[in-house]
Amino acid sequence: MKVLVFVEGKTEEKVMSKLLKAFDFEFRIIDAGGKERLNQKLSDTLAPLLGQPLRVLFLRDLDNNETIPGLVQSAEHALQAIFDSRGFRISPVRNTLNHFNNVFVWHSNKLDFRVALHIATYRWNESFVNATIDDYVLALALEPAIATAIAQSQNLSVNGEALIKKVTEELPALLQRNGISLTEAKNYVRLYAAIVKAHTSPPVLAEKVLNRSEVNKDRLKDHFKSIFAALESLK
């Protein structure tokens, strides 16, 4: 089975490249180049393929000016527009996955068509203005075993425990004293990336963290369980 995975940017691409290895899927990851272009990318890619078996996953962050119902409605309108553009008078049926209020699935048995939308709703810190894939990466990066593995792989002079303390306490406190607030996970990810010499790049850090997640695969599955569930729903 081939799955088309649409992502907003490079961090999601790194995450999905890792998670999809747990499935016996043939897959293609498509970077839409930002949330504003995602629906158009869906249309351009999916419309010509209607009529053949299709399995699709797309990932959305939840920014502070967005709501889950709004994102679901936007996705539904985009999918309906794709069907209408090809002359298919079908409205895909929508379901919410049990136990996951951030995963929505549309299907049409007539066309062997199934699409899952995953919305990032987890915030590592409840005060963050956005919920993003970076929150999931940050939580995994702060697992003691994974932080230790990263510190060792980067030949740092600090251990995993000290690395976690610097990212979550020492550096944020220093910035706060200088009038700089950290308002989303990406801010902490950049601090973490700078310490471990990942060029302050969230996608680079995500790749390092996911590569080191081999030391605790159960925690990887736990942190990304809603994405695993979304992928399972496409079978």
Image (spheres, rainbow, N blue to C red):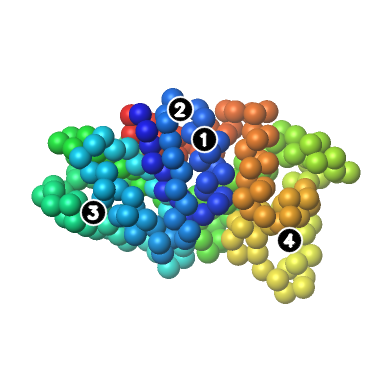
Q: CA distance from mark 3 to mark 1?
A: 28 Å
Q: CA distance from mark 1 to mark 4?
A: 30 Å
Is the C terminus in the top left, top right, bottom left or bottom right quadrant?
top left
Q: Secondary structure at mark 1?
A: helix
> In front of the other: label 3 or label 1?
3
Sequence order check: which comes first, mark 2 or mark 3?
2
Q: Does the CB distance between marks 3 and 1 fall below 8 Å?
A: no
**Quarter assignment of residue 230:** top left
The residue depicted at 55 percent of the width and 42 percent of the height is 15
**Quarter assignment of residue 36:** bottom left
Q: Residue lying farthest left?
A: 89
**Quarter assignment of residue 209:** top right
Q: Residue lying farthest right?
A: 157
Q: Does the CB distance between marks 2 and 3 fall below 8 Å?
A: no
The kind of residue on which mark 4 rests is: Pro
Q: CA distance from mark 2 to mark 3?
A: 28 Å
Q: Does the CB distance between marks 1 and 2 fall below 8 Å?
A: yes
Q: Secondary structure at mark 3?
A: helix
